[in-house]
Image (cartoon, coloured by chain):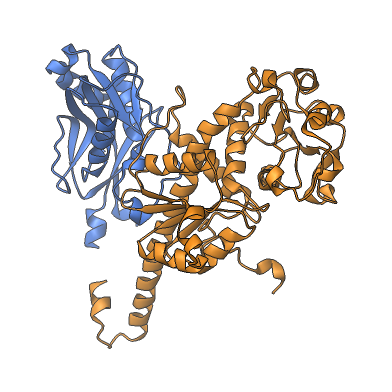
Amino acid sequence: MSRFSTPNPQLNELGKIKHFLTLEGLKQHHLVEILDTAESFINPKTDEIKKVPILRGKTIMNLFFEPSTRTRTTFEIAENRLSADVASLDIATSATKKGESLLDTLWNLQAMQADMFVIRHAESGAAHFFAQHVAPHVHVLNAGDGQHAHPTQAMLDMFTIRKHKGDVFDLKVAIVGDVLHSRVVRSQIQALSILEAREIRVIGPKTLMPTHPEAMGVHYYDNIEEGLNDVDVIIMVRLQNERMKSALIPSEKEFFKLYGLTEKRLALAKPDAIVMHPGPINRGVEIDSAVADGPQSVILQQVTYGIAVRMAVMAIIMSNSAQLAQHQSEQASLELEELAALNPTSENPTVEKA
Amino acid sequence: MTDLMTELNIDVEALMQNICEQLQKRDVLQQDPKMIGILKGGAWVAQKLHAQLKIDAPLGELDISFYRDDFSKIGLNPTVQPSTIPWEIEDQHIILVDDVLYTGRTVRAALNEIFDFGRPASVTLVTLLDRKGCRELPFHVDVTGMEIECNRTIHVSGPDPLKVSLVDNSKEQEA
């Protein structure tokens, strides 16, 4: 068998999402299911997101090893709107500081009957590591790991694009800023590719780009004026100062002069282009206040849609888990029937009942 | 298999007429009622009733998928849609419409969802058909077009034309 047949660790044996760690390796139908399900949580007229009882009796634990405001809060709201029991742990300030190993922490929390862990960690691959070590009925959701992936952020961005543009397909999307250090951008590029966006552009100084951006299936522009020309969607990302090991830009002022999104630059995009930003925004560094607060900005809607998209991912994971259990019990009774057919004389009380 | 079954098309217009006549005898029509159809079949029936009874307030629609009691067994319905209730539920007289009352579990889910929107003054349950004898929860229908026995399977298609047919599978079960 070729290396391509290696099973994707985030899919179950029915090919459905079990853990949500990265968008890499997922199919278009997986992403569309998330977007469609998210749609069903939102009132089409008021954008209101109503509480539903589907995850009643399930326990979700949010493990944030790295600080976060928006992601953590929207996850908590999403979990509450699904009627799950929620526990949020600020791990940076608790057990691990007392010398407990990561896995011991995990197993202790698992013993508290968690059904799902939402994990944010500064190390790339942390969510995969957890997924490898949890019990079979426990699910792991990546809320951002190092420079690797932030799949729910990318999905809420796709949802926002779809809400405004009808479909991601056939759109020209420009991502501006620190591509090198951003897990959000990595996940966005994967999502846009899976959903077959017409063109993905990345714009920024070479020092904030991977060595070969083309390898990600994108077009690289170091000139923002050229890069923004005729695009449908502009995604601004912030400078990831905390992940930069050395000075990669001369100064924030200089960055704004070269790459900041101003009204003048926005006018180069299509007239109905939307402006997105995963937050937190740095006014006057990557985006001008007039644009961030302007009519083409959908930055705050992204936050609202984040609730519905995270609800969708969690609901789908628990739904897939239920369907797998149902499938396995059907398989088991089928096997029993086959056994009984092979040995019609043997007395098997379970088969008699079936 | 097919030759063992007898398929019977139901005259939907006659059932609708029957339901309208029964509803007109009830106080609820004088109480500025609000109508809710349960997606999908119930909403098709509700659309017709809503027009025939000339109810002022727009029709509400419920998708009860998120309120089903078998989520832990069968998971999410892939075609789930948002529910739309375009008015306040609080203190309103509600006419809840479904195509068939069978085990009662859909009505339970619908009532739970309605109560999450508010406390209605009353709920009147209307179904096109009442499939008797297989109730699993203590519900009864207030107004129905027709009662049928439990051993008949029902096919509802719509919305336009709204068609209902019955398949008698008692012979199949005997065979």
Against A232, is A102 above or below? below
- How many numbered badges does the structure rendering display? 0
Q: Is residue A118 visible?
A: no
The structure residue drawn at horizontal position 69% and vertical position 21%, both measured from the top left corner, is A291
Quarter of the image for the N terminus of chain A: give it. Answer: bottom right
Give left or right: position of A306 versus A197. left
Chain appearing in orange on the rendered image: A
Quarter of the image for the C terminus of chain A: give it. Answer: bottom left
Q: Is residue A281 visible?
A: yes
Q: Splitting the image into 4 quarters, where does residue A301 fall?
A: top right
The structure residue drawn at horizontal position 46% and vertical position 22%, both measured from the top left corner, is A45
Write down the colour of chain B.
Answer: blue
Query: Where is residue A113 drawn, in percent x and y?
Result: 35, 61
Q: Splitting the image into 4 quarters, where does residue B31 fall?
A: top left
The structure residue drawn at horizontal position 72% and vertical position 33%, both measured from the top left corner, is A171
Query: Where is residue A166 drawn, in percent x and y?
Result: 61, 29
Against A189, is A51 above or below? above
